[in-house]
Image: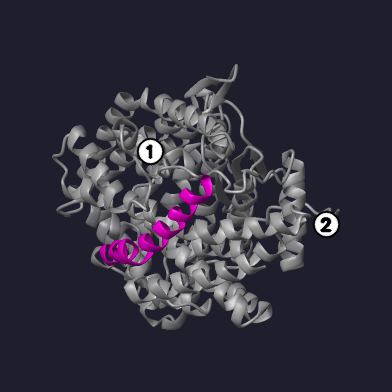
Amino acid sequence: MIVTDKKIKKPQRSYFSETLDISSWDEVKPLLEAMKEESLNSEKELLGFIEKYGELENIVHEEAARRYIDMTRFADNEEKGKAFHTFYASVVSQMKPYDFEFKKKIYDNKHFRSLPQEKFGHLQRIIANDMELYREENIPLQVKESGLSTKYGAINSRLTASFDGEEKTLSQLGVYLKDPDRKTREKAWRLRMETLGSAKEELDNLFDQLKEVRIRQAHNAGFENYRDYKHRELGRFSYTPEDIMAFHDAVEHEVIPFLRELNQERREALEVESVRPWDTAVDLDGKTLKPFGDSEELINGAIRILKDVKEGYAAQLEMMKNSGLLDLENRKGKAPGGYNYPLAETKAPFIFMNAVGLHRDVVTLLHESGHAMHTFATRDITITPYLHTPSEVAELASMGMEFLTMDYWGHFYSDPSDLNKARRDQLEGALKFLPWCMIVDAFQQWIYTHPGHTAEERDAYFAGLMERFNPGVDWSGLEKEKIVSWMYQLHIFEAPFYYIEYGMAQLGALALYRNYKTKGKEATLKEYDAFLALGYSCPVEKLYETAGLQFHFNRDYVREIVGFTRQALNELQAY
């Protein structure tokens, strides 16, 4: 099935030569020095300068993106990692002082104040925040942090174990958690945790180094702790750390009781004394959904699904396929996880993931496709900061796409009972994710507001959080495995505090699906597309409003979303 045979083409540059060697600081520096001297004597010249610097940023960001992509695709290749870190240190970090100067040049310009507030007011706030946080002494610390954080992927990519006579990655061992045989599941789960635990000392030491580097950045910027510094750096203008704590509370009191009901049903269906960690993923009917055989089947099925939602979505994913912008299958030496990485100059995305043949791979690809559609929708935005959407916005685009496509998953499942099962898993999974999301965030909140803690104290606090947000899983006798679980979460190492946004967006995605069911497909897609096209050109609450949603995560709102989800599950049960 061909939606389009077109390939994505990089737009022509408006301000810089196509032959510019962006990897050479000797070529880049004179351009920046010349821009420092430019006079901005009119609104037109100011806007031209904003666009010009944005173009240069996009050129640099794309080069960094391509090197990062190569590094994660071939995590066991030291040269790929070296190429990324060399570029980051020699060009990206060298540009940071100029970035501050140019933003100050823009912000202080008298014409900036006279620009229409509706379009540029949010830009003023973003730039002001960046200037307040900038410290030149933090640049080498950020370079060091970047180098340290990517060691996590290298360590993880080396973790393999022999299972059934074959060498397996941690991701590949996860496949067995769906096995109907409980002994097989337990064996795979224990081996997975044992393999991760074998790197505990190395990962503890790595994290302590990262923590120290991050704390120094916060102190340099005048903050008492890294948590508050990072909250500001992430541009969280629409909510406070206290609001996030209220989210923790809401999940504990509104979501956990419902999940315990579901796990009680699971215990009865499995006919076991208690639900153990290796029992949480297995299908209750003993049937594991295996929707595709290889990555070609996966991508073609996703294109067909997107075509049923909106043909333009399918055409864009097809163009990514034609342009070599997909790396989907899991393999040894590849970094864990999945992402959509925008190529800023090409104005197209790259999707990276680790598919192993399970239903979650379908969801992951559709999730990343939501990010991709966001990238395509903002192609015409010329104000670069408006392209840097915060995660609570970006993840709404991706998680929202999971639910917008859910009723069309029949392209992977010809059996209606399989489709029904996949949809139930999606609805239940949206809520099942929230306790872990709260644990990851609350864990980091504690870590960075108690910076003098030991590794042992860190483990003990994490174990306490696992109990606070326990949805009815029996961890007795698994204390060692419990405390090592956080090391599986790459965000804690590579992207601190970037996780709670998934919880916010998950609520938004469920609300989007509620709109789909009540307002209808056409009205919901119209609001969703309008939301995508805005990028980050206005505050978060305004973006959610454009999508037809509220930006709340207190007890009342969470209770409302849980109620809708319960109703939707009951309707599927009756189907």
Q: Residue at x 50, y 45 (%)?
A: 271
Q: Residue at x 59, y 66 (%)?
A: 378
Residue 551 in sight: no
Q: Pointer 1: what residue?
A: 146
Q: Residue at x 62, y 64 (%)?
A: 379
Left or right of 252: which side holds 32? right
Position in image of residue 259 (x %, y %): 42, 58
Crowding at dot 1, Cα within 10 Å, few <14 / some 14-19 / many 20+, comes out as some
Q: Pointer 2: what residue?
A: 4
Residue 167 in sight: yes
- Residues shaded magenta: 244-270
> Please, which colouring scheme is shown?
one colour
Circles 1 and 2, Cβ within 8 Å, touching? The answer is no
Marker count (numbered): 2
Q: Pick whichever, 454 or 260, lies toward us.
A: 260
Position in image of residue 20 (x %, y %): 59, 43
Residue type (three-letter) at the residue carrying disc 1:
Ser
